[in-house]
Image (cartoon, helix red, strand yellow):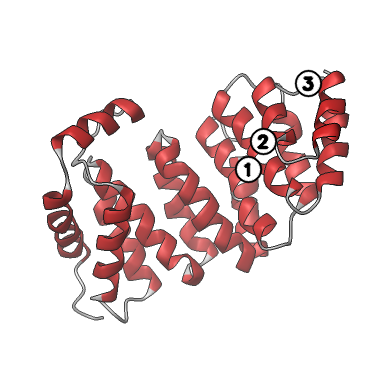
Amino acid sequence: MDDFDPATAALAVTDALRPLGTPGRAAQEKRYLKSDLEFIGVGVPDLRRVVKAAVRARPGLDPGQMVAWAVALWREPVHERRAAAVEILTLAAPRLAASDLATVERLLRGSRTWAYVDALAGNVAGEVALRDPAGAWPRVDAWAVDEDFWLRRSALLALLRGIRAGTPDLARFTRYAEPMLTEKEFFVRKAIGWVLREISRRDPHWVAKWTEGHVSVMSGVTFREAVRRLPTAEAERLGRLR
């Protein structure tokens, strides 16, 4: 689509969202996310419906145009614009290249909340890494040791796409998670447990063994997530080791 203008498309999405918001929801979500952004007060189902309709109305966009559209949406400090940017990148993810992770990283650094980080990491970076492991994982590996804990969380959550596709990278998970086990940051602790919980859906034995080997240094939140889907007897056995 040669005449595509990202700023105009971003404004069109915003204009479509504004009538769907309510002041009450806006105030509630702003408090919940502890955010200093503007909130329109649009629910997730409505937001996704608007974004999908906007994408369908612009057939033929290439991946670069989709990324530019997301960046244009993100530029304004409005929660729903940034959430819409994440949705557009999620829709574009099957066609994105490893080089697009530079933009994803920039958005992750500006997110400062799980509300954007989790989808950018799990749905976008994880999808790109699944299709282009050689190109994508070196960047994600760097996130795992970044000073920003949201990037460290993102590295862990990028593993989820492969786990759910039946190709878990257990060695990479261990390499990421072991140095993070003693961290005090809740969002990192939670992410380690979340990944273990997802692995346990298909390989509970591996998760039980890994948890047993690290149980003495696991935080409570990591442990609770790790054993959540294990057989009750196994979870109780591991609990007695703490």
Label 1 and label 2: CA atoms lie apart by: 7 Å
Q: Quadrant of residue 98?
A: bottom right
Label 3 and label 1: CA atoms lie apart by: 18 Å
The image position of residue 130, as x and y in percent, is 63, 63
Task: Determine which residue is flagged by label 2.
Answer: 192
SS at badge 3: loop
In the image, is 69 to the left or to the right of 193?
Answer: left
Q: In the rendered view, tell whether residue 22 sits above or below residue 124.
A: above
Q: Residues within 10 Å of mark 2 (few under 14, many from 20)?
A: many
Which mark is in front, 1 or 2?
2
The first of marks 3 and 2 along the sequence is 2
In the image, is 226 to the left or to the right of 189?
Answer: right
Task: Determine which residue is flagged by label 1.
Answer: 156
Task: Determine which residue is flagged by label 3.
Answer: 217
Rendered residue at 21%/38% (across/down): 39
Instruction: Specify the amino acid type for callout 3.
Output: Val
Q: Quadrant of the C terminus?
A: top right
